[in-house]
Image: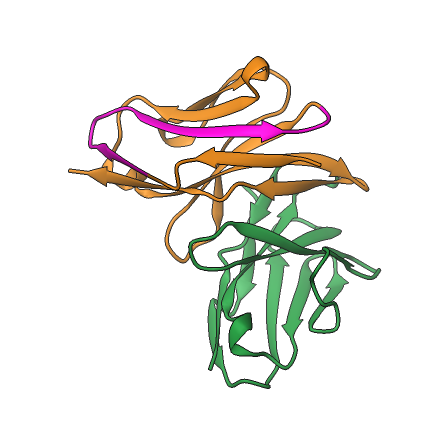
Amino acid sequence: AQSVTQLGSHVSVSEGALVLLRCNYSSSVPPYLFWYVQYPNQGLQLLLKYTSAATLVKGINGFEAEFKKSETSFHLTKPSAHMSDAAEYFCAVSEAAGGYQKVTFGIGTKLQVIP
Amino acid sequence: GAVVSQHPSWVICKSGTSVKIECRSLDFQATTMFWYRQFPKQSLMLMATSNEGSKATYEQGVEKDKFLINHASLTLSTLTVTSAHPEDSSFYICSAPQLAGTDTQYFGPGTRLTVL
């Protein structure tokens, strides 16, 4: 069974500082990994995804994540935080199940950006 | 990108009544859609997989008679919460892969259900 662990349910950074949101996964097969962002009372928006191509994945809004198989990690980073980055971020892993991808989400990390 | 809509965006109902939530893929056909539930300050939990033209597949612990799913067409899936109770109050989100078997899912904006 696959699973995702997000370290830190709340992360606070100053505006302009580095953003680092941690995610470790467990999967019995090569995983597909995702980061989603959720703004209050809204659905999820895909930030980026890893699907066995380049290990460094660039996403929207300046975010990127690096797949490290040896560490079973897929941490999300952004060099300089912006106030608009304040939201909840979910790491997710998917595996094929009956012709579709079944997605398992982490518990989420709430990012606070301090002016 | 592909768009998934949900209706209503929020609903308040009395305990014991039933509520229907619609999930539509607006510019693509979705033979499969997924329904998630998100309690406050928690992650999304997959409830069921909705399959066009066949029965839905429910995750362990989800009551199929309470959460009725109908995937009537290639662009519409509905979730009906029957005999709703306050503990059913939650944020319900649907998603759909644009192409069958692909890894990217598109999420609806969610429906906030409050049962009084």
Q: Position of residue A94 (x, y in %)?
A: 65, 36
Tell me, yes or no, if residue A17 can be seen here.
yes
- Image quarter where the C terminus of chain A lies is top left
- The number of numbered badges drawn on the structure is 0
Q: How is the image coloured?
A: by chain
- Image quarter where the N terminus of chain A lies is top right
Compared with B19, A9 (above or below) is above
Compared with A51, B16 (above or below) is below
- Decide if residue B43 is on the left or right side of residue A16: right
Task: Give me the residue at 37% from left, 31% from top.
Answer: A61
Task: Give me the residue at 49% from left, 44% from top.
Answer: A107
Q: Position of residue A75 (x, y in %)?
A: 45, 25
Q: Residue furthest right?
A: B54
Which chain is represented by orange in the image? A
Any magenta on residue B24? no
Task: Give me the residue at 52% from left, 22% from top.
Answer: A73
Q: Quadrant of residue A83?
A: top left
Q: Name the tint of chain B in the rendering.
A: green
Any magenta on residue A25? yes
Q: Quadrant of residue A7?
A: top left
Tell me, yes or no, if residue B102 can be seen here.
no
Magenta extent: A11-29
Q: Position of residue A45 (x, y in %)?
A: 47, 43
- Decide if residue A114 is on the left or right side of residue B51: left
Along the line of sight, which residue is nearer the eye, B37 or A43? B37
Q: Residue furthest left?
A: A115
Is the stretch drawn in magenta largely helix, strand or loop? Answer: strand
